[in-house]
């Protein structure tokens, strides 16, 4: 309509549509990357919670037992 040939106008239209599609894909990729990062952080947090729970549940009784043994043997006063 602005004095452009039909072929040129169609090429410009196609280029604009392609740019819009690429922008849409870039936004979708950004959302997926954010979700992946959030999932990785959640997995690390769960792993750290599991390690902390293991130390508390598994190691505390052993440490308490060793403290009692040292105390009973009189070693605690020498530390």
Image (cartoon, rainbow, N blue to C red):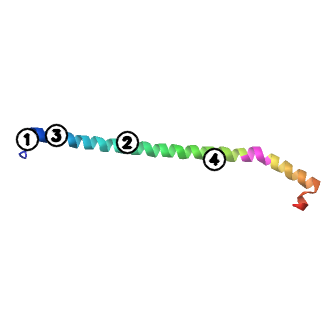
Q: Which residue is mark 3?
A: 11
Marks 4 and 2 in Cβ contact (< 8 Å):
no
Does the stretch in magenta take in 57? yes
Determine crowd level at label 2: few under 14, some 14-19, many 20+ residues with C-alpha closer than 10 A.
Answer: few
Instruction: Please name the residue shown 70% across and 45% down the image.
Output: 53
Marks 1 and 4 in Cβ contact (< 8 Å):
no
Which of disc 1 and disc 2 is earlier in sequence?
A: 1
Label 2: element kind:
helix
Vertical relation: 50 (above or below) 71: above
Which of disc 1 and disc 3 is earlier in sequence?
A: 1
Determine crowd level at label 1: few under 14, some 14-19, many 20+ residues with C-alpha closer than 10 A.
Answer: few
Q: CA distance from mark 2 to mark 1?
A: 35 Å
Determine crowd level at label 4: few under 14, some 14-19, many 20+ residues with C-alpha closer than 10 A.
Answer: few
Q: Which residue is mark 1?
A: 5
User: Which of labels 3 and 2 is toward the front?
Assistant: 3
Q: Residue 23 shows which numbered tag?
A: none
Label 1: element kind:
loop
Instruction: Please name the residue shown 48% across and 43% down the image.
Output: 36
Left or right for 64, reference 41:
right
Residue 24 x/y as whole percent: 32, 42
Q: CA distance from mark 3 to mark 1?
A: 10 Å
Residue 34 x/y as whole percent: 45, 46
Q: Which residue is mark 2?
A: 28
Instruction: Please name the residue shown 91% across and 57% down the image.
Output: 75
Label 4: element kind:
helix
What range is drawn magenta here?
Answer: 55-60
Left or right for 70, reference 55:
right
Q: Which residue is mark 4?
A: 48
Secondary structure of the magenta portion, mostly? Answer: helix
């Amino acid at each position: 309509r602005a004095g452009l040939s039909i072929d040129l106008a169609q090429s410009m239209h196609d280029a604009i549509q392609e740019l819009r599609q690429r922008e849409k894909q870039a936004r979708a990729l950004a959302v997926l990357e954010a979700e992946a990062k959030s999932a990785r952080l959640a997995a690390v947090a769960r792993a750290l919670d599991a390690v902390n729970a293991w130390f508390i549940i598994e190691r505390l009784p052993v440490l308490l037992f060793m403290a009692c043994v040292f105390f009973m043997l009189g070693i605690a006063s020498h530390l």
